[in-house]
Image (spheres, rainbow, N blue to C red):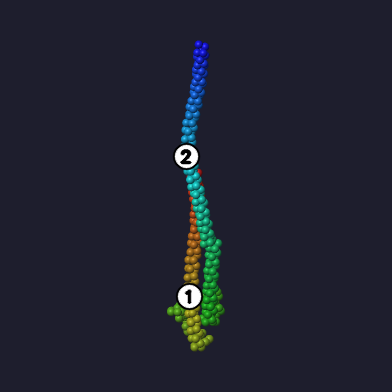
Amino acid sequence: AIHRQHATDTADIAAASILHEADVLHVQNQVLEAKVVELTTELVKTQYELKLERVNYKHLHRKVLGLEAQLENQVLHVIDLEQRLACTAADLAAAQRTNEQAAPTTDVIAMCTEHLTMLHEDLDMYDARCAMYEAGIRELWATYVHPSKPELTKHATPPPIHATNKCDKVREPNDADSDDTASIDSDEYSGGQVEVVEMAYHHQLDELCESLAVSVEAQHKQLAAIKAMEIQLEMDKHQYEEDVSTTRCETDVMIGDVDVRYLHEVLVNIDR
């Protein structure tokens, strides 16, 4: 009986120990299950956050690529604008140099002044030639027409000359008394000498008349040419001034348009 009681006690103790161990294992299992659930939840949360990070990374990567493309386009656009501005500035400088070299104002004025001076010198030359012809006519008149009378003064004019073809015949106001004139001529010259003198006089007078007519006609033509030249020079001067003013206005407008377009494009790019 004692042995049996001892076996029973031993069995009870073993069963109690087993139950205690089972309880401990159960508690440990519950703790481990709770930790597994917590770790599983944290893993799921981490996986979700990782997916979000991947999505955000892809979105940001695409956005960065787009910004890099825009930046590259803006850099290329700025380079193109700088090249266009440099070309425009070079064209404007070349146009200004061409306008300055083509017809500067000082050269035009100097050329007009020199040409007008030459024309006035020609007029003075023609006036001197006319005065020489008038002096020759007065000298011939005093020598052959009235040799006994003093020379005509500068303001005195010979009697009117009536020419039939080429001043073939010279008539004087006092030719009515031809007998008296013939008697005076017969006292000074013989008949043959008078005819020779008259022929020489008429010949020289014809030459003087022709020369004087040609000189007067040439002087009239020269005066008309000078007048036309002065009008043309005045028109050229006004045209040149208008061209210079127009060129300056166009240059200012071109520079203003380039600046406005450049600023507008820069502002548009900044807004973008």
Q: Nearer the viewer, residue 181 or 196?
A: 196
**Which amino acid type is shown beneath numbered disc 1?**
Val
Q: Position of residue 240 (x, y in %)?
A: 50, 60
Image: 62 above or below 161:
above
Q: Helix, strand or loop at disc 1?
A: helix
Where in the figure is residue 99, as x and y percent of width and height?
A: 52, 59
> In the structure shown, which secondary structural element does the residue marked by tag 2 occupy?
helix
Of all residues shown, which one is farthest toward the top? Answer: 1
Residue count near mark 1 (Cα–Cα under 10 Å), binned few <14, some 14–19, many ≥20? few
From the image, state whether disc 1 or disc 2 is nearer to you: 2
Kind of residue at disc 2: Lys
Q: Is residue 172 above or below residue 94?
A: below
- Disc sitting over residue 214 in the figure: 1
Residue occupying image coordinates x 53% and y 78%:
136
Residue ID at (52%, 58%): 94
* Residue at 51% in and 55% down: 87
Q: Earlier in the sequence, mark 1 or mark 2?
A: 2
Residue 164 vertical position relative to residue 63 in the rendered view, above or below: below
Residue 249 rendering spot, x and y as whole percentages: 50, 54
How far apart are the two marked residues, 1 and 2, measured between alpha carbons? 104 Å
Residue 58's label in the rendered image is: 2
Q: Please give the label number shown on residue 256.
A: none
